[in-house]
């Protein structure tokens, strides 16, 4: 594969840093920007020969394709359309791939801003967590023009096991909302099941070994039950970020008139986890909440 000498990556958090690393490992030259410069320096120390910029605009100045993975709608606006945003310097004909989990409204807003400058835009949120990013096994759901998708696909495939074009702008973010809605219910159900098994005096591991082979099995069950049983919640996606995502889902549902009773309830359970000081615990900490309510832990 011929290396693309004009890539930029904005946002080097727990997801963005390994995603950018996969681009380098594939032979690309990448100019990076991160709001916390120390993280950018740590990443550069691991990837000699790459470069960093002091602003998104400077990172994008020579780029043909810019990928970003930041925190929320406001962060995307800042790095794209702010005073030092990438649209200040990005050339016509360029492509922006936004891997941030954000609102569909934000995706449409950014696509419009890009279109005014003859720049293509893809909303391309990811699923799979930090582990998926590190292993290059993410799932990416993409909204935007088909031609832009085909152009960005070879890059996204470097850190994903599945990349799917879902439809026009906003479709990627809408699909990610469905993903988070489903996860919320699954994690709560798994937490209730493990808590029930414990209070019934059952061997929780044996229970999982049996039921995971049947209709109750899920990714969450297979990948999170051991740390949940061990009362360890430092693995994967944080509660604070999940609440941000669920707020987007609930807001969108109100606009559609869609009913999300379980999602709304689990969102409040996560608020209780935050009140316990667990904002940075991973999402499986719903079990911890049940144990605290029961006076167990």
Image (cartoon, helix red, strand yellow):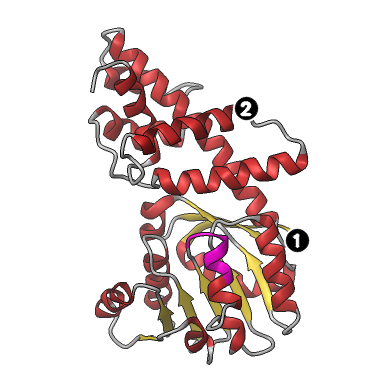
Residue at the (69%, 86%) spot, across then down: 93
Question: Where residue 220 sits in the image (x, y, percent)?
Answer: 42, 35
The residue carrying pointer 2 sits among few (fewer than 14), some (14 to 19) or many (20 or more) residues within 10 Å by Cα, namely: few
Q: What residue is shown with label 2? A: 261
Residue sticking out furthest to the top: 200
Residue at the (28%, 44%) spot, across then down: 234
Q: What residue is shown with label 1? A: 168
Magenta stretch: helix, strand or loop mostly: helix
Residue sticking out furthest to the front: 275
Residue at the (28%, 84%) spot, across then down: 48
Q: Is residue 116 left or right of residue 68?
A: right
Camera sees residue 149: no
The residue carrying pointer 1 sits among few (fewer than 14), some (14 to 19) or many (20 or more) residues within 10 Å by Cα, namely: some
Camera sees residue 52: yes
Q: Is residue 250 above or below residue 58?
A: above
Residue at the (26%, 17%) spot, across then down: 295
Query: Which numbered circle lies on residue 229?
Result: none
Q: Nearer the viewer, residue 147 or 59?
A: 59
Q: Quadrant of the C terminus?
A: top left
**C-alpha separation, residue under disc 2 versus residue under disc 1:** 28 Å
Q: Is residue 3 above or below residue 291?
A: below
Magenta stretch encompasses residue 270? no
Question: Where residue 122 sits in the image (x, y, percent)?
Answer: 65, 68
Count of numbered circles on the image: 2
Question: Where residue 240 sits in the image (x, y, percent)?
Answer: 42, 46
Magenta stretch encompasses residue 73? yes
> Residue 63 falls in which quadrant of the image?
bottom right
Q: Secondary structure at mark 1?
A: loop
Q: Secondary structure at mark 2?
A: helix
Residue range highlighted in magenta: 71-77
């Amino acid at each position: 594969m011929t290396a693309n000498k004009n890539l930029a990556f904005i946002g080097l958090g727990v997801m963005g840093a390994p995603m950018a690393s996969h681009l380098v490992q594939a032979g690309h030259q990448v100019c990076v920007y991160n709001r916390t410069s120390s993280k950018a320096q740590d990443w550069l120390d691991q990837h000699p020969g790459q470069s960093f910029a002091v602003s998104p605009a400077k990172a994008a100045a020579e780029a043909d394709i810019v990928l970003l993975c930041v925190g929320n709608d406001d962060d995307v606006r800042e790095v794209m359309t702010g005073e030092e945003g990438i649209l200040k310097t990005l050339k016509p004909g360029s492509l922006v791939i936004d891997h941030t989990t954000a609102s569909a409204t934000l995706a449409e807003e950014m696509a419009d801003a890009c279109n005014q400058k003859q720049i293509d835009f893809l909303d391309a949120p990811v699923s799979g967590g930090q582990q998926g990013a590190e292993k290059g096994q993410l799932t990416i759901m993409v909204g935007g023009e088909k031609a832009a998708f085909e152009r960005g696909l070879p890059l996204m495939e470097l850190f994903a096991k599945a990349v799917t074009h879902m439809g026009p702008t906003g479709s990627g973010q809408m699909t990610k909302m469905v993903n988070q809605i489903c996860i919320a219910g699954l994690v709560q159900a798994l937490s209730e099941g493990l808590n029930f098994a414990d209070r019934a005096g059952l061997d929780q591991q044996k229970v999982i070994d049996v039921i995971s082979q049947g209709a109750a099995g899920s990714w969450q069950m297979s990948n999170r039950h051991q740390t949940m049983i061990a009362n360890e919640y430092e693995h994967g996606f944080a509660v604070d970020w999940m609440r941000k995502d669920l707020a987007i889902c609930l807001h969108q549902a109100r606009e559609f008139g869609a009913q999300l009773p379980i999602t709304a309830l689990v969102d409040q359970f996560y608020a209780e986890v935050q009140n316990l000081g667990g904002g940075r615990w991973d999402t499986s900490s719903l079990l911890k909440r049940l144990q605290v309510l029961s006076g167990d832990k």
